[in-house]
Image: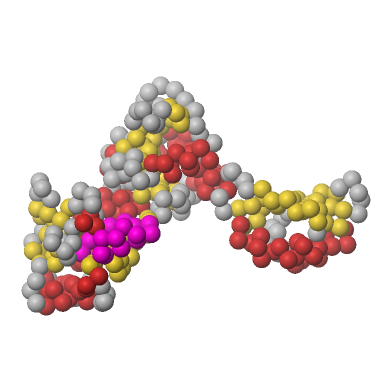
Amino acid sequence: MNSEEELVKLALPKGSLEKATFAFFERSGYKIRGQDRTYRPQINDPDIEIKILRPQEIPQFVAEGDQDLGITGSDWIKETRANIRKLLDLEYGAVRLVMAVPKTIADKPFQEICRGYWESSRKLRISTEYLNIASDYLTSLPFYSDFFGKKSPKQITPWWTKGENDLASIYLSFGATEAKPPEDADAIMDVVETGTTLEQNGLVPIETIMRSTASLVAYPGALQDSRKREKILDIMSMLKGAVEGSKKLHIFVNVHKDNLEKLIAALPALRNPTISKLSDPDWYSVNTIIDKDFLIKALPVFRKLSQGLVVHEPRQILPLEEIESFGNGSES
């Protein structure tokens, strides 16, 4: 599968997700070279062709089949409404998409702010990169139709304007969204990690619209191509393995034969451990995978009933049966 037509085309994100994405791929066993010099870096898999694009663009390029796979934020999947298949939540790049307003009006829920503007026939201006999500949010308010019927919020960009409701106007922002209020916007919808930038600009996040993480998405047609589908399953295995590995610990512990059954009974989370005899016939080694959070809870039991606890953080735990189930068409 090395001809150009057979390569799996994979779009990786530029910008805020970029550094974390390359680190995640390294953890997944992939080595990518040249990303600092080109938008077409090399990867240590001859069946994959990489291109670096903005995360905002990736859903549409994948939907049109220009890219077979892409990594983008779930916020952009929702915003673009692209016809793509979400394969995996990669669980990094976590941000919140919030509605934020100046501190002077942050003493009430955003819905009540909207109601106050519209009851007095004032124009509510929202600045954001997320025109569709903002529009969907406003029209979902239980009283929106009472004020405006079926009129859609007005979406305003430098190139086009659509929507009939001027009292709910959503302006496309090209960055520095937090600088828009109060002169150019009454509220903003933007992504935040800590909220520090909003605070520095006198804004308060008063409602979380959604939470977003990096996701692996696919062009549906690529999943119908038998050769590409097999490679996509391999990629899914490697990436899912890194996700699962980040949540688990691999432990080895030595247990005296008199305490072995006590240990297993006291820690039911030790699912199907591997138990091996040591050179001393009175001692056994217990080897298993546990959730990270479980270690703190289990430590008192280990301390009382065992010796020589060794803990490793696995780089990957590949859920091969789960991926093969997907490949056989029994995916959820």
Question: Depth check: 36 or 331 in front?
Answer: 36
Give coordinates of residue 10: x percent, y percent. Answer: 39, 35
Position of residue 12 in the picture relative to residue 167 (left or right): right
User: Which quadrant would residue 18 be assigned to in this image?
Assistant: top left
Q: Could you tell whether 150 is left or right of 142 in the image?
A: left
Residue 222 drawn at (x, y percent): 38, 37
- The residue at 33%/42% (across/down) is 15
- Residue drawn at x 61%, y 57% as measured from the top left: 292
Number of numbered discs on residues: 0
Seen from the viewer's position, the closer of residues 179 and 47 is: 179
Instruction: Determine the residue located farthest toward the front in the rendered image.
Output: 200
Closer to us: 161 or 88: 161
| Residue bounds of the magenta highlight | 187-203
Q: Is residue 64 magenta?
A: no
User: Looking at the image, which is closer to me, 207 or 8?
Assistant: 207
Q: Residue at x 66, y 48 (%)?
A: 312
In the rendered image of this protein, does residue 103 appear above or below residue 136?
below
Q: How is the image coloured?
A: secondary structure
Q: Residue at x 38, y 38 (%)?
A: 12
Residue 104 higher or lower than 244, as above or below: below
Q: Is 264 on the left-hand or right-hand side of 139?
A: right
Whole-percent x and y of residue 101?
Answer: 23, 67
* 253 lies left or right of 108: right
Q: Residue lying farthest right?
A: 281
Q: Is residue 329 visible?
A: yes
Residue 131 position, x and y percent, is 20, 55
Taking the magenta stretch, the answer to whether it contains residue 197 is yes
Answer yes or no: is residue 221 visible.
Answer: no
